[in-house]
Image (cartoon, rainbow, N blue to C red):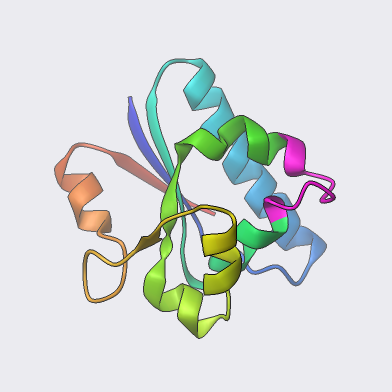
Amino acid sequence: MNLLVQVLADVETHGDLGRVVNAMEVVKEAKEAGDDVALTFDGAGTRWVGILADPAHRRHDIWEAVEDRVVGACSYCATAFGASEAIQGAGVALLDAFEGHPSVRGYLADGYRVLTY
């Protein structure tokens, strides 16, 4: 299976943490099953990259398990939400294939299913 998982959840609430953890769990499960899985961060979700990449964060363990499947974060949204520096510091690419945003259509055209959290 080809799967793109997008994190859109903000970082404000316990529910937001639950959404990003659920997204990473899906990525981890798909990775372990041998699926072609990609993880991106978009919108307010771009804030998560710097937070999860911090070894002191309580869910850094799952970040480490899926970090190799993180293809990037939306360049436009990273700027809008003040997350660009943290994303670059984490070594994650800024994606700008379509008007400053990642190309979700490209994944769809390649036969990927898309899940958003």
| Residue found at the far top of this picture | 33
Relative placement, left or right, of 101 versus 82 is left
57 versus 45 height, above or below: above
- Identify the residue shown where x is 75% and y is 60%: 15
Depth order, front residue of 91/21: 91
- Identify the residue shown where x is 71% and y is 59%: 51
Relative placement, left or right, of 64 versus 80 is right
Residue 112, horizontal then vertical, whole percent: 27, 38
- Identify the residue shown where x is 32% and y is 40%: 113
- What main secondary structure does the magenta stretch of the protein show? loop
- Residue 116 painted magenta: no
- Identify the residue shown where x is 78% and y is 46%: 55
Could you tell me if residue 110 is visible in this image? yes
User: Where does the magenta region start and end?
Assistant: 52-61
Which quadrant does the N terminus fall into?
top left
- Residue 54 painted magenta: yes
Depth order, front residue of 1/39: 39
Residue 87, horizontal then vertical, whole percent: 55, 62
68 versus 55 height, above or below: above
| Residue found at the far left of this picture | 109
Which quadrant does the C terminus fall into?
bottom right
Q: Quadrant of residue 63?
A: top right
Residue 57, horizontal then vertical, whole percent: 82, 51
24 versus 10 height, above or below: above
Relative placement, left or right, of 101 versus 108 is right
Residue 11, horizontal then vertical, whole percent: 70, 68
